[in-house]
Image (tube, helix red, strand yellow):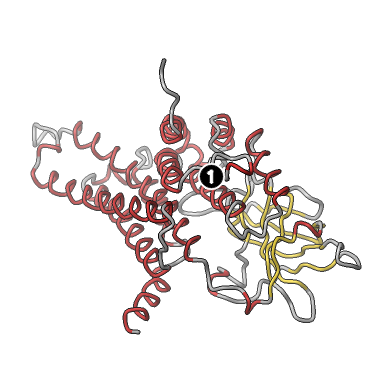
Amino acid sequence: MNAPLTAGQLARTLAVEFGARAAVHDREGSFPHRNFTELQQAGLLSLAASRHLGGQGASLAQLGEVVGAVAQGCPATALVLTMQYMQHRAMGRAGSPWPEALARQLVQESVREVSLINALRVEPELGSPARGGLPATVARRAGEGAGAGWRITGHKIYSTGAPILRWYVVWARTDEEAPRTGAFLVRAGAPGIRIDPTWDHLGLRASGSHDVHFDSVPVPASHALELRLPQDWARGDSAVQAEMVVLLGRLYTGVARAAREWLLDFLRTRTPASLGAPLATLPRVQETVGTLEGLLLTNERLLRGLAADVDAGVPVSSVDSGLIKSTVTHNAVHAVEVALSLTSNHGLARRNPLERHLRDVLCGRIHTPQDDSVHVAAGKAALG
């Protein structure tokens, strides 16, 4: 009897079909709904949630393997999946503000059907909340008393997965005399929500990262997950950052691996008449491919080590994980650039996937923590 496939093996199998559809979604800027139906049917949407909530309790290393495999086929799908995994892990973390019954409801929805969740934090004026500042999105009490609900009004941008999300975790401030900030769980499709299809990006064009508008959207009192005075929020959680670095690092390294696979096939089969042999036989080409291999090996070792530390409960400083994020991202970008250097016009032709891989991998630089923050923090730590 054959053993059941692991999550990573399932993801690699699905990624083949995702990859076959990725060019069309990229060209059209269309959302890959079918990919998520297949991920749900394979049991991969609830992989990150803790077992006591009804999920599978996968390790960070296992989640990274899945995200990296999916990214080789469709990185936009992998990005939405990453956000699902981050939210599901947060629900089961010790000290989580999530009411257990509510968290279990959302996890079990994703077991039964396509149900996804993401945090909506970025705003036109605020930019990334990681840089500080109060959100313009406002939560107002919908009645009197402690049990009164809220009404949310505001505008969020870069809302990854907007066409498919079932739930939003909306970062907002209250309209109290001393405003508190925090997260509100909002059901997609509730009255007063409008999705504006603004996403027309260079890379990850299929991620559906549109604008979402909220106009006095009703939210039950129990869906205010955590509210604090702005000064009472810690400046980031190093464990959460390390998790995100592993998953996003795997994602963009997966894009670079897809570029590598196409490149190797191209070099083995491309035989210029002037050479009379495949490009792969040239020492200069072999040396350059060796450079690419070194970049990917470095990423593999860094991400595997970071995931192992997180899974073992070893504390990882935000400085360390930030430096790993910066290094891995730059290596992934450089790996695709190296592949392009060996392909001339072929690599830039839209009939081939390499130019798409370049556009997608460049998006890795945008994610928090960004290079300037990473290097300032590391420099301050070194200098005391």
Q: Quadrant of the N terminus?
A: top left
Q: Quadrant of residue 350?
A: top left
- Give the farthest residue toward the right: 144
Whole-percent x and y of residue 198? 61, 55
Q: Residue at x 14, y 45 (%)?
A: 285
The three-letter code of the residue at mark 1 reads Ala
Up-down relation of residue 38 to residue 193 (above or below): above
**149 or 359, which lies in front?**
149
- Position of residue 234 in the picture relative to residue 298 (left or right): right
Q: Residue at x 40, y 64 (%)?
A: 316
**Tag 1, which secondary structure?**
loop
Whole-percent x and y of residue 205? 51, 48
**5 or 54, which lies in front?**
54
Up-down relation of residue 57 to residue 12 (above or below): below
Whole-percent x and y of residue 143? 90, 65
Whole-percent x and y of residue 373? 43, 73
Q: Quadrant of the C terminus?
A: bottom left
Q: Residue at x 45, y 41 (%)?
A: 74
**215 or 117, which lies in front?**
117
Circle 1 sits on which residue?
48
- Position of residue 23 in the picture relative to residue 107 (left or right): left
